[in-house]
Image (spheres, rainbow, N blue to C red):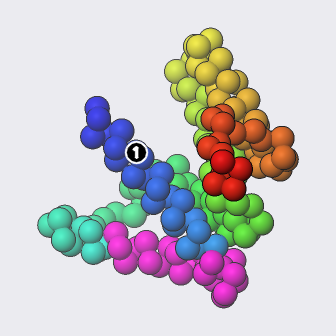
Amino acid sequence: MWMAMMLALLAGVARTLSRLLNARLAGQIGVLPGTLVNYLGGLAAAVLACLSCGVSLPWPSLAWVTVPGWAWLGGAVGVGFVVLCNRVTPHVSAFAMTLLMFAGQMSAGLLLDAWLHAGLSGWRVLGAVLAGLGLLGTLWVDRHPRAARPCVASAPSRETA
C-alpha cells in the first residue's frame, strides 16, 4: 500500500513537471505543435520502455479493429488535457493550477464513483466539500496576501533586540 501511495505522489510530481515543461514549449512553438511534440515524445518513451522491459511491440500483429472504441478515448482526452494545460498554465501559478486540477479530479472522482458504483458515501462527499473549502481558502489567501497571517510568531529582528 505504501509503495502505491509513494508512486502516486511521484506521479503527481511528474504531472506538475510535465505540465510546466509542455506549457513552456507551447509558449515557444504554439499550443497545438507543443501538444504534438508532447505526444510524439510520449510515444518514443513508451516504445523505449517496452523495449527495455522486454515487452514485444504489438505492431504489426495487433488487429487494430479489435481495440474497443472507448479505448481510443484515453489518448483523445489526454490531448485535450495537454491543450488545456498549455493554454492555462502560463496564466496561473503552478500551485493554483495544481489546486484547481485537484478540485477537478476530486469532482470527477465523486461523479465516477456515483456512476460506476451506484452510490456515494456521505463521508466522501463531506471530505470533498472540506477539501474544496480548503482549496478555496488557499486560493483566496494567494489573491489577498495581506490577509494571511503567520501561524507562528516570528522571531524579533536583531535591530529591535
Q: Which residue is mark 1?
A: 8
Measured as percent of width and height from the top left, residue 33 is found at 63, 83
As for residue 49 lying within the magenta part, the answer is: no
Range covered by the magenta-colored residues = 24-46
Please, which residue is most extreme toward the left here?
54
Q: Nearer the viewer, residue 138 or 56?
A: 138
Element marked by disc 1: helix
Magenta: predominant secondary structure element? helix
Q: Residues within 10 Å of mark 1 (few under 14, many from 20)?
A: few
Measured as percent of width and height from the top left, residue 47 is found at 31, 73
Measured as percent of width and height from the top left, residue 122 is found at 62, 11
> Left or right: where does residue 140 sit relative to residue 48?
right
Q: Is residue 2 visible?
A: yes
Q: Nearer the viewer, residue 144 or 101?
A: 144
Q: Nearer the viewer, residue 17 or 142?
A: 142
Give the vertical position of 65 relative to 12 (above or below). below
As for residue 27 lying within the magenta part, the answer is: yes
Three-letter amino acid code of the residue under disc 1: Ala
Picture mark count: 1
